[in-house]
Amino acid sequence: MQYWLMKSEPDEVSIDDVMASPNETTAWFGVRNYQARNFMRDQMQDGDGVLFYHSSCPEPGIAGLAQIVGGPYPDASQFDSKSKYYDAKATQEQPRWVSIDVQGTQKTRLLSLAEMRTIPALEDMIVLQKGSRLSITPVTPAQWKAIVKLLK
């Protein structure tokens, strides 16, 4: 089992949106960074743990827990010319971007970026590194355990 931090802008998809349909999954789409895409395509597996992170908002941070459900599949938004995620170079035969489904497991208190910076066990987290902008990053088992313990 692996663990991931996945960023979402809460005005696009929030932890509340995901938790509103507890028996359903939410497609994680619109990722347009090759490294993040490769994590989704090549490494994420059914059952992996997810730290659901709210970004580009007044107080960014971890807002809940989720899990990966199923495997990657072509991101439909790359083919939709009306979508802000449209990619004219993508074809049905050779898609460039993938989606993966997540299912919310728990809404938590907000563990802010500022609070995360004060926790020694998290000092090596990618999201805390200067200049880190990736929307999806791996999380170590030790980091996952430290965060889950803080959120309980």
Image (spheres, grey):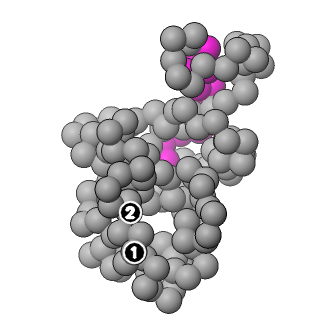
Position of residue 62 measured from the top left corner of the image (x, y, whole percent): 38, 62
SS at mark 2 in the image: strand
Position of residue 37 measured from the top left corner of the image (x, y, whole percent): 67, 41
Nearer the observer: mark 2 or 1; the answer is: 1
Residue drawn 27% across the image and 75% down it:
152
Q: Measure how far apart labels 2 and 1 are at the Cα level.
A: 8 Å
Residue drawn 42% across the image and 50% down it:
56
Residue occupied by mark 2 = 61
Magenta residues, start to end? 68-79
Q: Is residue 144 left or right of residue 75?
A: left
Q: Is 101 placed above or below 51 here?
A: above
Nearer the observer, 141 or 34: 34
Residue occupied by mark 1 = 114
Q: Is residue 75 left or right of residue 37?
A: left
Residue 76 is a magenta residue: yes
Looking at the rendered structure, the kind of residue marked 1 is: Ala
